[in-house]
Amino acid sequence: MKLKLIQYTPDPERTVAMSARLCYSASGAEELVQTMSDVQVGTLIDKLFGMGHLSTFEHVSFTFAIEGISRVLTHQLVRHRIASYSQQSQRYVSEHGFEYILPPTVAANPEAKAKYDVLMRQVQQTYDELVALGVHQEDARYVLANATETKIVVTMNARALLHFFEKRCCQRAQWEIRNLANAMLAEVQTVAPRLFTKAGPTCVSGGYCTEGSLSCGRLAGIKKQK
């Protein structure tokens, strides 16, 4: 997996704080941006978290370039609807000799890996043969596996990202999208640490678990540390 935060709203924490302050101030947005101190910005962001007033987090966005992931992952990713996606097209981009993602449980089992690799080569060969027979790429792609590597550009606002991290950083999330979510969280924490200081699964962000009997048990450890 290759991930890079390629663009984000300049000074995102100040933008969020200014937007909140504007609701209760006679001053204009430009003036507030210039006059609010770093301490005021941090205090206001903490207050917004405490009150659950996160609408102003929607004013800042983050754009990621992601490669080396499977169609399995992106099928899950696009279910997060408050976002913008641009994905590499299998209709227009040739998949001759496509790369594929190997799940860790398959990689750890030599017999399973051998069967997996054989099937991927068969899929690759069938795709090539269909195209050689005159079948358009947009129809030949029907034989491609969910494991096929893909590339995607994703833009989410900060509030949508907080929700994404709650769902996908959880140990119960599927391994590939969980790895992606953790990598995205690490990226945004470097540029907007105050906005994402409480980000993560609900056991981290809210002190509760939604998984019931399927819980991984992490919440108990967090409570002990407190």
Image: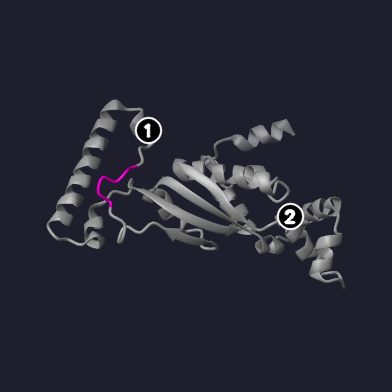
Looking at marks 2 and 1 on the same chain, the residue that comes earlier in the sequence is marked by: 2
User: Residue 142: percent from the left, percent from the top?
Assistant: 24, 57
Marks 2 and 1: CB-CB under 8 Å? no
Point 57% across, 49% down: residue: 5
Indicate whether 18 appears above or below 46: below
Point 60% across, 35% down: residue: 218
User: Residue 161: percent from the left, percent from the top?
Assistant: 60, 54
Residue 26 horizontal side relative to residue 117, left or right: right
Query: Disc 1 marks which residue?
Result: 105
Query: Disc 2 marks which residue?
Result: 13
Label 2 neighbour load within 10 Å: few <14, some 14-19, many 20+: many
Label 1 neighbour load within 10 Å: few <14, some 14-19, many 20+: few
User: Residue 164: percent from the left, percent from the top?
Assistant: 56, 52
Identity, as a three-letter code, of the amino acid under mark 1: Thr
Residue situated in front as seen by the camera: 119 or 7: 7
Identity, as a three-letter code, of the amino acid under mark 2: Glu
Residue 216 horizontal side relative to residue 205, left or right: left
Specify the quadrant that holds the C terminus.
top right
Label 2's element?
Answer: helix
Point 17% across, 49% down: residue: 126
Q: Is residue 201 visible?
A: no
Specify the quadrant that holds the N terminus.
top left
User: Residue 84: percent from the left, percent from the top?
Assistant: 51, 62
Say which of marks 2 and 1 sits in front. Answer: 2
Q: Which residues are magenta?
A: 95-100
Indicate whether 180 appears above or below 57: above
User: Please, what is the dominant secondary structure of the magenta stretch?
Assistant: loop
Residue 199 horizontal side relative to residue 14, left or right: left
